[in-house]
Image (cartoon, rainbow, N blue to C red):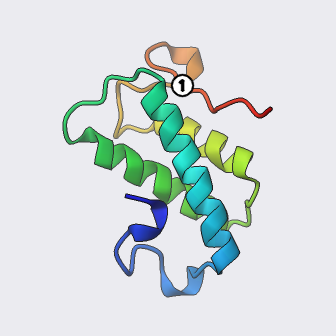
Amino acid sequence: MSIISFPAGFASADAAFDTEATRVLGEAFETAWQAVVTSGAAIADGQADAFRECLARRMIEMGRRGEWNQDRLVEDALLHLAKSRMAPDVSAPCSGGLVVSPPQSS
C-alpha cells in the first residue's frame, strides 16, 4: 500500500496535495517503510498495516505543516513511529528496544 492509495477522505479536502507534493510524500513514505523493513524489526502479524498507516498519517500531517524535505519527512515519521503508543516495542533511541534509523543520505 503506498501513501497515495489510502481511501478517499483519509486527508481532509482542504489538505489536498498537488502532484509534486504527492510524489514527495510517496517517495518519503517508501523510504521510511524500507527503513523499518530492513531494520530487522520483528513486526507481528497484522502490525505492518498499522505501522504503515502511522508513518503515512505523520507524513501527511507534516506536509500540511509545510514540510517537503524528504529526509526530514522520513526522520520525523520514523521517530514518531518509534515513540508511538501504537507500537510499544518500537522505542525511541534513548529508551532501549528497537530503534529504526532513517537511511543515511549519500
- Label 1 sits on a secondary structure element that is loop
Residue at 73%, 60% in the rendered image: 67
Quarter residue 2 falls in: bottom left
Horizontal side of 100 relative to 37 (left or right) equals right
Q: As displayed, is residue 92 above or below residue 69?
A: above
Horizontal side of 43 relative to 102 (left or right) equals left
Residue at 74%, 61% in the rendered image: 68
Q: As displayed, is residue 31 above or below residue 12?
A: above
Residue ID for mark 1:
92
The quadrant of the rendering that contains the N terminus is bottom left
The quadrant of the rendering that contains the C terminus is top right
Callout count: 1
Q: As displayed, is residue 87 above or below residue 27?
A: above
Q: As displayed, is residue 36 above or below residue 94?
A: below
**Is residue 82 at least partly visible in the picture?**
no
Horizontal side of 73 relative to 60 (left or right) equals right
Q: Point out residue 95 in the picture as x, y percentages from the top left corner.
A: 52, 16
Residue at 61%, 78% in the rendered image: 17
Q: Point out residue 33 in the picture as x, y percentages from the top left corner.
A: 48, 42
The amino acid marked with disc number 1 is Ala
State the residue lying farthest toward the left.
Answer: 45
Residue at 57%, 82% in the rendered image: 16
State the residue lying farthest toward the bottom.
Answer: 13
State the residue lying farthest toward the top.
Answer: 96
Horizontal side of 20 relative to 44 (left or right) equals right
Q: Point out residue 11 in the picture as x, y percentages from the top left corner.
A: 47, 75
Q: Point out residue 94 in the picture as x, y percentages from the top left corner.
A: 59, 16
**Is residue 81 at least partly visible in the picture?**
yes
- Circle 1 Cα neighbour tier, 10 Å, few/some/many (<14 / 14–19 / ≥20): some
State the residue lying farthest toward the right.
Answer: 106
